[in-house]
Image (cartoon, grey):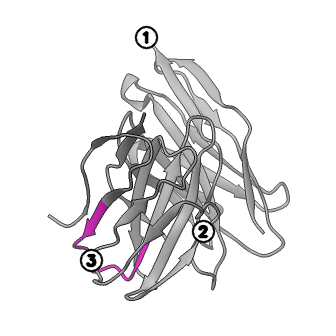
């Protein structure tokens, strides 16, 4: 079975500073990886995904993530954050040829301070 | 506009009552999912359906039931057997040939 660990439950940063949200996964087979963002009292929106190919994946809103197979990580980064990036971020994993069930991490609450 | 709708956004019920949450999609997606979200626990899968008239239990199906009579609809019933029903419920859908799931806006259920 797959599992996901988001290493930080809360990350406070100042506006225009860089940020990294950490995600590690566990799986005995190859995986697909996702980052979703959730604004207060809303559903989840897909930020980016890794299926195969280049390990550096670019997403919406200036976010990017790097797949590192040896470290089983998929950390999310943004070089300069804005107040509007304040939200909860979820890392998720599924396996190819499976039932497409997503396994989610516990979430990281990103707070941007002016 | 294509998307997933969930209604109502807020729902209040008394303990011991069954309640049904609506989820409709017009994306022509084959698969649909129900998740429960609690603070600090991420999302947990309740039920999922890959085709009409078929569905499977997820990780926390006890106290819940679903039906999939139409491709575009996947209602979730929270029964009185669910011990802690107060939560935020999210519905999602996906194409069989694609892996990313699209989420609805959610329903916040409060049971007192």
Q: Secondary structure at mark 3?
A: loop
Vertical relation: B106 (above or below) A95? above
Q: Secondary structure at mark 1?
A: loop
Q: Are marks 2 and 3 on the same chain?
A: yes
- Sequence-first tag of 2 and 3: 2
Is-magenta flag for residue B24?
A: yes
What residue did someone put label 1 on?
A: A114
**Mark 2 closeness class: few <14, some 14–19, many ≥20 residues within 10 Å:** some
What residue did someone put label 2 on?
A: B58
- Which residue: 49% across, 28% down? A80
The span from disc 3 to disc 1 (Cα, nearest Å) is 43 Å
**Which quadrant holds the C terminus of chain B?**
top left
Vertical relation: B78 (above or below) A111? below
Relative horizontal placement of residue A68, taking residue B43 as reference (left or right): right
Relative horizontal placement of residue B4, taking residue B37 as reference (left or right): left
Residue B4, position as x, y percentages in the image: 27, 62
Q: Nearer the viewer, residue B108 or A55?
A: B108
Magenta region: which residues?
Answer: B22-32
Indicate the chain on which mark 2 is placed.
Answer: B
């Amino acid at each position: 079975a797959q599992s996901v660990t988001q290493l930080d439950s809360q990350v406070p940063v100042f506006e225009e500073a860089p940020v990294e949200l950490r995600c590690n996964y566990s799986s005995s087979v190859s995986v697909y990886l996702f980052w979703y963002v959730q604004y207060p009292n809303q559903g989840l929106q897909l930020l980016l995904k890794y299926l195969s190919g280049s390990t550096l994946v670019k997403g919406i809103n200036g976010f990017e993530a790097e797949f590192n197979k040896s470290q089983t990580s998929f950390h999310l980064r943004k070089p300069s954050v804005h107040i509007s990036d304040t939200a909860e971020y979820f890392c998720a994993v599924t396996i190819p040829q499976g039932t497409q069930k997503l396994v989610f991490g516990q979430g990281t609450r990103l707070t941007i301070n002016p | 506009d294509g998307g997933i709708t969930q209604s109502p956004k807020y729902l209040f019920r008394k303990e011991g009552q069954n309640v049904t949450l609506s989820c409709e999609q017009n994306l022509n997606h084959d698969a649909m999912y129900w998740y429960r979200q609690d603070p600090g626990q991420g999302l947990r899968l309740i039920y999922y359906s890959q085709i009409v008239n078929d569905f499977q239990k997820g990780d926390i199906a006890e106290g819940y039931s679903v039906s999939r009579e139409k491709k575009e609809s996947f209602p979730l019933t929270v029964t009185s057997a669910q011990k802690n029903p107060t939560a935020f419920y999210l519905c999602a859908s996906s194409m069989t040939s694609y892996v990313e799931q699209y989420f609805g806006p959610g329903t916040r259920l409060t049971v007192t």
